[in-house]
Amino acid sequence: MPIDATLPYDDQNIFAKILRGEIPSTRVYEDDHALAFLDINPQAPTHILVIPKGAYVSWDDFSARAPDAEIAGFVRAVGIVARNAGLVEPGYRLLANIGQHGHQEVPHLHVHIFAGRPLGPMLAR
Ligand code: AMP
């Protein structure tokens, strides 16, 4: 079920538990501001999730409240993860779902990295 991205942060959400190491994940990158791990239900041959370490519900929350250093660190981390995975050529797609119409399911900001095949048009029609 999509979440209401205006709700306060819930520290029991599944990505908060992954950040705390309470449930397993296949981690591919970590630094001061971000953690990246493989999506449990991949939608492409490569499907990585990148999350900020701070407690932010969504892109809306993050872009409104996060200090500049956290925003810069997170944006750079997304680029590093894709570069480290060798995705720059032939390319990849970033996606962040926000709220109900965005079909966001986990209420901790995450950016999806999809790659590994031609990904087709942006949205299903
Ligand atoms: P979204 O619809 O943008 O909120 O995407 C949530 C994503 O989290 C989906 O692609 C799920 O497959 C993924 N996901 C849910 N639980 C886990 C988990 N425990 N480990 C890795 N990925 C997960």
Image: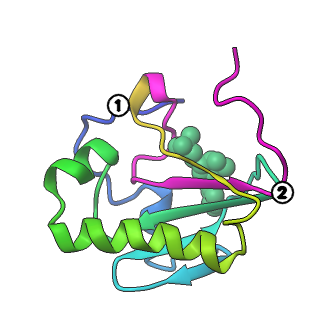
Q: Please rate how many residues cluster around mark 1, counting C-alpha atoms within 10 Å: few if below 14, some from 14 to 19, many from 20.
A: some
Report the magenta stretch's main SS. loop
On the picture, is 111 further left or further right than 115? left
In-image side of 45 versus 65 (left or right): right
At x 35%, y 31%, the residue is: 4
Alpha-carbon distance for marks 1 and 2? 29 Å
What residue did someone put label 2 on? 45
Q: Residue at x 49, y 83 (%)?
A: 30
Q: What is the crowding at mark 2: few (fewer than 14 residues within 10 Å), some, or many (at least 20)? A: few
Q: Which of the marked residues, 1 or 2, is nearer the chain's N terminus?
A: 1
Residue 55, percent across and down? Answer: 28, 62
Q: Which residue corresponds to mark 1?
A: 4
For the C terminus, give its image quadrant: top right
On screen, 17 above or below 118? below
Residue 80 can be seen in this image? yes
Disc 1 within 8 angstroms of ligand 1 (CB): no
Q: Residue at x 26, y 53 (%)?
A: 62
For the point 48% across and 44% down, the residue is: 96
Q: Quadrant of residue 75?
A: bottom left
Stretch in magenta: 101-125
